[in-house]
Amino acid sequence: MHMLNNYFKKYFAVVLISLFIGFTFSPIINANSVSMQSKKVSEINSLVIIKDNINKNQRDQVYETSLYFSSPKTTKRGSNIKISLQEETSQTLKPNQPMLPVVTKVYILPFKSKIKDLNIYFGEVKEKKLLEPLCLAPEPIPIGQIDIKKQQIKNQQSNLEIYPKDHYNYYLNSGRYNDEIVNYLTLKIYPVQYEPINKKIIYYNKVDIILRYEMPDKPSNFGDEYDLLIITPTIFSKELKPLVEHKENYGIRTKLVTLNEILWGISYPKEGRDRAEKLKYFIKYALEQWGIKYVLLVGGRKGGVLNPIWWVPARYSNIVDFIEYSFLSDLYFADVYDSEGNFSSWDSNNDNIFAEWRAGKKDIIDMYPEVNVGRLPCKNKEELIILVDKIIDYETNTFGEEWFNRYIGVAGDTYPNNNEPYYEGELSTQASFDYLEGYKSVFLWTSTGSFSSEQDIISHVNEGCGFLMFSGHSNAFIWSTHPPENNTWVDAPNCFNMDVFKNINRYPIVHVSGCWNTRFDSGILVMINGILREGHRYFIKTSPPSGYFSYEWVPQCWSWSLCGIQDKGCIAITGNTGLGYGINGEDCLSGKSNFIELQFFKSYSEGMDILGEVHSNQIIKYMSEFPPMEDKIDCKLAQERTLLGDPSLKIGGYPPKL
């Protein structure tokens, strides 16, 4: 049985009830390790800034350019062929369809621009015969699923005349780029197409692009009074005053607004159908009037059984997938505008079901963030005081400390039983570290034996590190992974015993993959709701686990437990509020959870040093490569990625004042 501490004893009665109906904890068995192979991750998302090179005296603008591509490279992979391109930014990943190179270009346009025409002219058509069929894109796998069978090559290619059917696609979104609200025009080009009937690829070495767009009638004017907006219930206001003073002292212009002022329209306009929408409308007001960049939501779940009650409102997305009908998404509050510059309601069909994607219904959502949102889901003043003290200490004392320049990656074989020498979590932690210049690495991997128990993590984290990454499986209770080709589990500390860490005042920023690790509505009330809703079925174990076996009833989710330790633990964490998805085997870094993980570290490597900006850019990069309205799982992965922490946090702290 997993370790129990004093905090857990408060909930022991719940566990006894569960034991009565047949639930037992799974034992942990360690296994021997084997070596792994490494893989270099490719660069992605070339940005082109158009907005700074325009004729401001004309509404109609024209942009022309040409792109050049090398000839496709073919690589034998088993009985199939993999096509790659030097300039590719990703590959087509529609399950069980051919994998082919994609080149993504992202053009930054003025806010509220309108696309009048986008023409792509391809150069000379070239052909190449193939002796074997192309590799097919794998099915995304729930990260809670471990019984993985090796993918079988399916005979679906013969039904295609040509793939992909279109030479290109483009998407227009509104979002934040550095300190401005802009339009993102994402152009996805397919320089290689496949004709399975003729067993050949056709490709192009050049494309000419002619973009015609219209400038807005008048430029949008945003205020410039505050940088950080803190939204809190009145009960927490006093405890936040030291944080406001600290931020102001370092030049972060900060405005604290209580929830009552927003919901009751005491000092500000009042709009919205429910509490969450009222809050989002206020964020829009604050962006337009004050020019805020960062929004810190202070408050977690307050109560409620059938319907949650919040200190600060939350929004549930209603994308229905494998076993899950809804999940939390703070991206809702960050996405202020749609692609035309209107309020982004996340309810395009106006049925009061937000971010809906189920049989016959789909809300069309922009999803690109205009503000950087983070949350401290505190349930009481004591939790808040701990986090405020840690934020102030981190930003004041971290700069120049040697321990900050350490990276710790914890991982193993995320999907065993696929008979391939690719350990997905280990590949992901290595690829993430490759973006960090000047950092020392500590890889705690099951394949090398450096990660065989939670003590391996504790001893290294206690020495301090700037970044701590976990790539594997999780639920609200615990994070775990596997030894190579072995279904047994190797665990990190669970949400009840985070006090085992002794990294006094050496707080890492944590990045964690898996399922439900950042489900900040967890608690006994969720379990009661589940029993009322499902009866005895709530205690039936599924794979991946849902309900009771996802540990949604623990008093604090794994991520928030790691944040909330006084003087120890982490300073902030990014993770998933719902079921995560990955790709197993050799292509594991090409999409889904591992891909979005890498974008965090790539964004940091590009010079971003404010946590909320890195987090937002991570999501933007993912959505640019995998447009969320084209794939339900991509949409969910972007929406569920959540930051628990201060979005205005200076990564590595501020230099000492002279």
Image: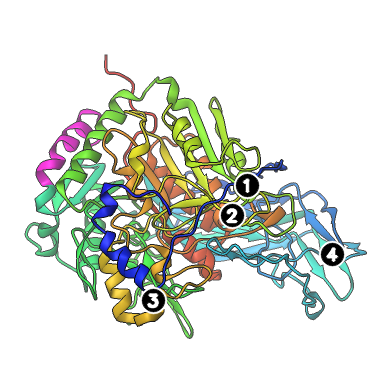
Q: Badge 1 local density, few (<14 within 10 Å), some, or many (20+)?
A: some
4 or 1: tag closer to the N-terminus: 1
Residue named by callout 2: 488
Hey, what amino acid is under mark 4? Ile
Hey, what amino acid is under mark 2? Thr
In the image, which disc is placed on residue 312?
none
Residue named by callout 3: 538
3 or 1: tag closer to the N-terminus: 1
Give the x, y percent position of residue 32: 66, 44
How far apart marks 2 and 3 lie (CA) works out to 25 Å
Dot 3 falls on a residue whose secondary structure is helix
Residue named by callout 1: 31
Displayed quadrant of residue 554 = bottom left
Height in image: 274 above or below 177? below
How far apart marks 4 and 1 lie (CA) works out to 45 Å
4 or 2: tag closer to the N-terminus: 4
Dot 1 falls on a residue whose secondary structure is loop
Height in image: 432 above or below 399? below
Q: Which of labels 3 and 1 is toward the front?
A: 1
Q: What residue sits 64% from the left and 45% below the top?
A: 427
Residue named by callout 4: 201
2 or 3: tag closer to the N-terminus: 2
Give the x, y percent position of residue 49: 52, 46
Q: Is residue 56 visible?
A: no
Direction top: furthest residue: 658
Q: Which residues are magenta?
A: 237-253
